[in-house]
Image (tube, grey):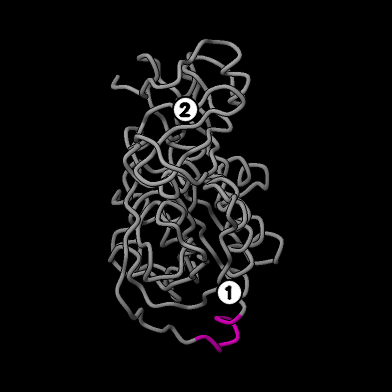
Amino acid sequence: MRIVFFGTPEFAVPSLSALIDSGEEVAAVVTQPDKRKGRDSTATASPVKELSLCKGIKTLQPRNLREPELLQELAHITPDVFVVVAYGKILPSTILSIPSYGCINVHASLLPHYRGAAPIQWAILKGEEKTGITTMLMDEGLDTGAILLQEEIAIDADDTAETLGKKLSALGASVLIRTIVKIKEGTLTPVPQSGSPSFAPPLKKEDGRIVWSASSEEIRNFVRGMYPWPGAYCYLNRQRIKITRVTTLPGTGIPGRIEKTNSEFIVGSGSGLIAILELQPEGKRLMTAQDFLQGRRVQEGIFFDEP
């Protein structure tokens, strides 16, 4: 099949790589414009762009998906299908209507659950025990298109958004190839989504603030779901502390109060206790809680405070 691939972050790379390795004709790749990063604001290519250039594939980086020149160029390719994996923008109807077989999206949830930009994070934040990959035929709605294939995966107790994202990225590539094969065989019938949808809106940096009045299990899920970005954080003596790994303990404490600081770093929550295992003070390296406690005096009974 003649394919145009839309994708941007590392999550999309295995899917693009699988399409190339499968022998399908990837005629072009559409990815987000380069972003400026670092202190020197160096323009940085997306992971998808790096792969497409390495493979010698025509790479487009439009700032506006409604540009007449872009629409003409995509139509001139005469694609059979568009494949969209974490591209980062909603495709307008003028683009959706171009390929003869429509547009296939690889979405990291079991739709209609967790429609939106951050399905991996929200599945962990909500304490789900399973998630998966859905390939769907895109329409103009937000992840509302008919389902093509789905495959389920367990969420392990120690999974973070990072580790779960890697698993789903690999699974997504596999499900995508099976979807393409079935479309070519004519054995795939799109099925409308059914059931009550849930949503996974994009996360902002300030969303990582820990609410210590939540239960210990909710806080543990919060830390896992927010890692590595935007990161779960709090303030201690007005210094921002990023909390990267915790576990729950039985017992009672006052929410946000530091209950123990000798051999363990224990904090009270709305229900149960939280043991902080790993953290990163502002401007410092990632460290164990024990290293943090050895390097400064943290009194029991004080609270994680306001900034």
Dot 2 or dot 1, earlier in sequence? 1
Residue at image point 30% right, 62% down: 142
Quarter of the C terminus within the rendering: top left
Residue 184: say if magenta: yes
When asked about the image quadrant of residue 147, the answer is bottom left
How far apart are labels 2 and 1 at the CA level? 42 Å
Q: Is residue 17 magenta?
A: no
Q: Give amino acid for label 1.
A: Ile
Q: Secondary structure at mark 2?
A: strand
Quadrant housing the N terminus? bottom right
**Element type where label 1 sits in the image:** helix
Question: In this view of the protein, can residue 80 be seen by the observer?
Answer: yes
229 relative to 198 in the view: left or right: right
Q: Nearer the viewer, residue 144 or 266?
A: 266
Image coordinates of residue 215 in percent, x first then y, are: 38, 47
Circles 2 and 1: CB distance less than 8 Å?
no
Q: Amino acid at mark 2?
A: Lys
Residue 198, which numbered label?
none
Q: Position of residue 260 (x, y in %)?
A: 50, 26
Report the side of 283 relative to 114 (left or right). Answer: right
Estimate the x, y position of residue 33 in percent, counting from the top left.
43, 37
Sort mark 2 into few (<14), some (14-19) or many (20+) by Cα contacts within 10 Å.
many
Residue wearing tag 1:
180
> Which residues, given as a range, are shown in magenta?
182-188
In-front residue for pair 302/155: 302
Instruction: Say which residue label 2 marks.
Output: 242
Can residue 60 be seen here? The reply is no
Image point (51%, 64%), residue name:
129
Q: Residues within 10 Å of mark 1 (few under 14, many from 20)?
A: some
Query: In the image, is 253 to the left or to the right of 298?
Result: left
x, y (%) of residue 93? 28, 64
